[in-house]
Image (tube, rainbow, N blue to C red):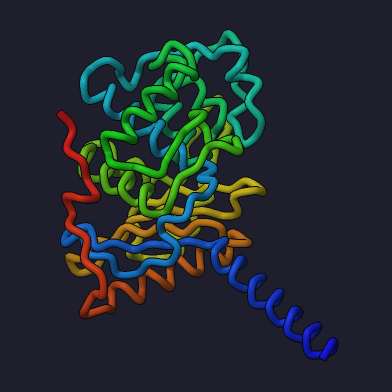
Amino acid sequence: MKKFLCYFLILLFLNNLAYASHLKRSSLVVDLNSGKVLHAVNEHSARYPASLVKMMTLYITFKKLSSGTLTLDQKLLVSKKAAAMPRTNMNLKAGTTISVRKAILGLIVHSSNDASVVLAEAIGGSEKNFVIMMNNQAKKLGMKKTIFYNASGWHNKYQKSTAYDLAKLAIALKKDFPKYFPWFSVTKFTFNNVTYHSHNHVVKNYAWANWLKTGFTNPSGFNVATTASKNGKHLVGVVMGEKTASARDKLMIKLLDNCFNKSQERTVIRTASLIQKQY
């Protein structure tokens, strides 16, 4: 009896371990045109977004550019706080300046933490005020399970989001800022005589991908948000919590391939429920 009980407890532990491992990952693929969900696993599970946070920093930056509050050639001052941000960064020095254009490319191509703080401080007056703007914007977009604590995605145990919410943000970026959206496909740029190359392996290796933002911290695992287009079909995909960058990229490519080939979708979400109009 004791042996049986021990065997049962071991099996229960292993099953729970496997279930926990499964819950650690979340993924979602949505048809951008129809709003239909083509794939979903733990899409509402709260996770650490890592540098996918920078999508919101860019959303607000694009909003300010569109309103004329910022210009691409405008020079922004690098503060001591921005210069002290840990890697990944562009080695910005306190007291120097960087253009809005180069700061944006820093976020998109190199996922620069220092450039994120520069933009946040320029727009909000301080990163703290900018975070308030981020959370207000998240509410407007219907990102109900998202809370931001910084502009870079540097790990904060309270900063959480979901694959579902981040898909909403990715869709909003594409629909609200078509003028700036092509910048996400840029794979390299030069600043201060240093050429920075993207971690953008899905865009490099998958012919149909046209935009991608990656994210990683040890607590978050490897995350990615991407859009892809094929034969008039447009998809938005999010993968969160993979164990390696390679596994993340392979899963994203597999999901996109599968969803491009699906003829019937199992779950329907109205596009309007994913996109909140801005007024």
Apparent side of residue 174 relative to residue 77 in the rendered image (left or right): left
Q: Which of 183 and 194 is in front in this view?
A: 183
| Res 57 quadrant in image | top left
| Res 42 quadrant in image | bottom left
Image coordinates of residue 66 in percent, x first then y, are: 22, 25
Name the residue rendered at 56%, 69% in the picture.
22
Work out whether residue 227 can be spotted: yes
The quadrant in which the N terminus is found is bottom right
Image coordinates of residue 269 in percent, x first then y, are: 22, 60
Q: Nearer the viewer, residue 220 or 252?
A: 220
Name the residue rendered at 67%, 70% in the picture.
17
Q: Which of 211 and 254 is in front in this view?
A: 254
Q: What residue occupies the far front of the structure in this picture?
A: 1
Work out whether residue 204 can be spotted: no
Image coordinates of residue 56 in percent, x first then y, are: 39, 35
Name the residue rendered at 34%, 26% in the picture.
61
Image coordinates of residue 217 in percent, x first then y, are: 62, 46
Apparent side of residue 215 relative to residue 63 in the rendered image (left or right): right
The quadrant in which the C terminus is found is top left
Q: What residue occupies the far top of the structure in this picture?
A: 95
